[in-house]
Amino acid sequence: MGLDGMDLVSAAIDRHGRRIQPEEVIFREGEPSGEMYVIREGMVRVLKRVGAEEVCLAILGPGEFFGEMGLLPSPRSVTAVADSEVLLIAIDAATFGQMLGETPALAMRILTRLAERLRMVDERLVNTMTSEGSARVVQTLMGLSRGGDRSTDGRIRLPAGVDEGLVAGQAGVLPSVVAGIRQRLEGLGLLGCDSDGRWWIASMRTLEDFGEYLERKRQVDPLPLDELAALAGMDLAEAEVLAERVIAKRLAVPERGIEAGELRTPMQRYLELKLRFEFRPRHGAKDL
């Protein structure tokens, strides 16, 4: 988000300076807009409301800009709060157009940064599509199981000829998505392959629970662990430990989990599934 070389235009825009006190709200999500801002001094937090909570998306420093969607204009999509005493340059659409015309180097920096932000949005869209695709893969496996047969140990053997390509075609996803969910299910002990190449499912009930977990995760999980780790300045393992502790505390249950009949809300159901399928498999738990 950096705008190196702001001195090139400081003489032209210093008259638009605005000093903000710590914890003062610069603008709120949903408010009308008409300006973007460049930070000359201090730090700014960018927040996004997710359900009943606000998530910190970024902390920006000197030389960085934010609120650029306000030049369209359109309602604010985030909230910005001063993290310290801040000196901002407020830039409206007319001033922005003049700056771009007079300072091509600045225009290129802004366009480059906007392209980076669009790339990040694209990546999140792909991640969302992959998440939905994983749920469709599970649904496809459950459908294929109806044409299978049950072995003596209770496993359901899928029809001969089921492979990643067939599942990908029926689920409407790329084979790489099927490969990823297959690896995940194999790690959970839910899916396997006999010596003759026939796929099998260990437990339909558990597979249904896993499908429910994926769907609830897509609907209600506001922050993937990799994003949580990045925002909190942790490595992924530390973020996993923290998230697991928070979930267990919210459920107020012993480490081994709780019975389904004790759950009181859809969110509690999701958190219980998250413990089963996302955290405890890493610890070698067998109670899936």
Image (cartoon, rainbow, N blue to C red):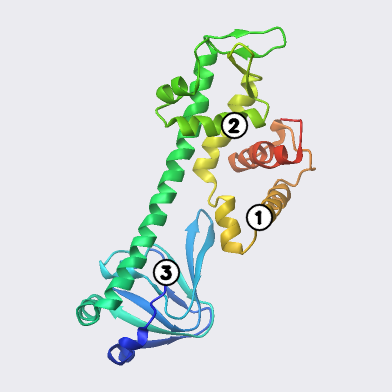
Inspect the image, locate mark 1, and give the three-letter code of the amino acid beneath it.
Ala
In the image, what residue occupies the spot 67% across and 51% down? 240
Identify the image quadrant of residue 185. top right
Secondary structure beneath label 3: loop
- Residue placed most toward the observer, 177 or 128: 177
Separation (CA) of disc 2 from disc 3:
43 Å
Which numbered marker is on residue 135?
none
In the image, what residue occupies the spot 62% across and 13% down? 156
In the image, what residue occupies the spot 50% across and 83% down? 42
- Which image quarter holds the C terminus? top right
Secondary structure beneath label 1: helix
The residue tagged 1 is 239
Residue 6 x, y percent position in the rendering: 36, 84
Q: Is 279 on the left or on the right of 101, as rendered?
A: right
Which numbered marker is on residue 183?
2
| In this view, the mark in front (3 or 1) | 1
Separation (CA) of disc 3 from disc 1:
28 Å
Q: Are marks 1 and 2 in contact (CB under 8 Å)?
A: no
Inspect the image, locate mark 3, and give the three-letter code of the amino acid beneath it.
Arg
- In this rendering, does residue 33 appear at all? no
Residue reaching furthest front? 195
- Which image quarter holds the N terminus? bottom left
- In this rendering, does residue 156 appear at all? yes
- Residue placed most toward the observer, 67 or 167: 167
The residue tagged 3 is 28
The earlier-in-sequence mark between 2 and 3 is 3
Binning the other alpha carbons within 10 Å of mark 3 as few (below 14), some (14 to 19) or many (20 upward) gives some
Inspect the image, locate mark 2, and give the three-letter code of the amino acid beneath it.
Gln
In the image, what residue occupies the spot 27% across and 74% down? 107
| In this view, the mark in front (1 or 2) | 2
